[in-house]
Amino acid sequence: MPLDKEESQRRQNVLVATTYFMHLVGIAAVLYHKPNYWKKPYHTSALLGKAWVNELIHGHPDHIFCELGMCLHVFTAFCGTLSMLCNFTTSRNGVTVEEQAAIFLYSCVTRLSIRHVGERFQHSDETISK
């Protein structure tokens, strides 16, 4: 049974739209897999982890307790113990003992993922997980 003119036109429009959509999907796939397509700096906050830890240390005493779950004098003793007894030093990435301790404590207190803690401290997931 032959198709009427409207049905034929509708089918042709569907075919054109489908072809166009598949073309766009192909372009998106190529762009997505290009190595430099997603290369953008991720950790770009003005307040780096060191600065935030310094703000906690030198700021209001309740602030460090709220964020890290320790009073300042306990945090200072904890960092000194890590340095002296456990031989913690500044890492190759330049992460100080205080910042390493803050990363650990902040992770414990907030139960956030490595990605979220990395965003707070402006470090990569690999640095945070170490």
Image (cartoon, rainbow, N blue to C red):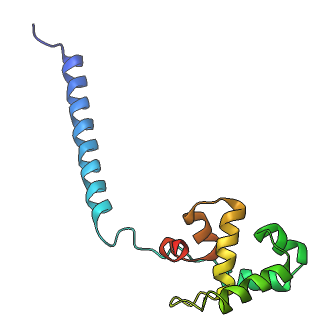
How many marks the image carries: the answer is: 0
Left or right placement of residue 116 versus residue 78 in this view: left
**Residue 125: x, y in percent?**
50, 71
Q: Residue furthest left?
A: 1
Quarter of the picture containing the N terminus is top left
User: Image quarter for residue 13?
Assistant: top left
Residue 4 vs 49, above or below: the answer is above
**Residue 58: x, y in percent?**
84, 86
User: Image quarter for residue 111?
Assistant: bottom right
Q: Nearer the viewer, residue 27 or 6?
A: 27
Left or right placement of residue 78 versus residue 90 in this view: right
Q: Residue furthest front?
A: 85
Left or right placement of residue 51 versus residue 61 in this view: left
Residue at x 40%, y 73% (from the top left corner): 39
Can residue 46 be seen in this snapshot?
A: no
Can residue 9 be seen in this snapshot?
A: yes
Q: Nearer the viewer, residue 57 or 8?
A: 57
Residue at x 78%, y 80% (from the top left corner): 75
Residue at x 68%, y 64% (from the top left corner): 108
Residue 11 vs 111, above or below: the answer is above
Residue at x 15%, y 13% (from the top left corner): 3
User: Image quarter for residue 118?
Assistant: bottom right
**Residue 23: x, y in percent?**
23, 48
**Residue 122: x, y in percent?**
59, 77
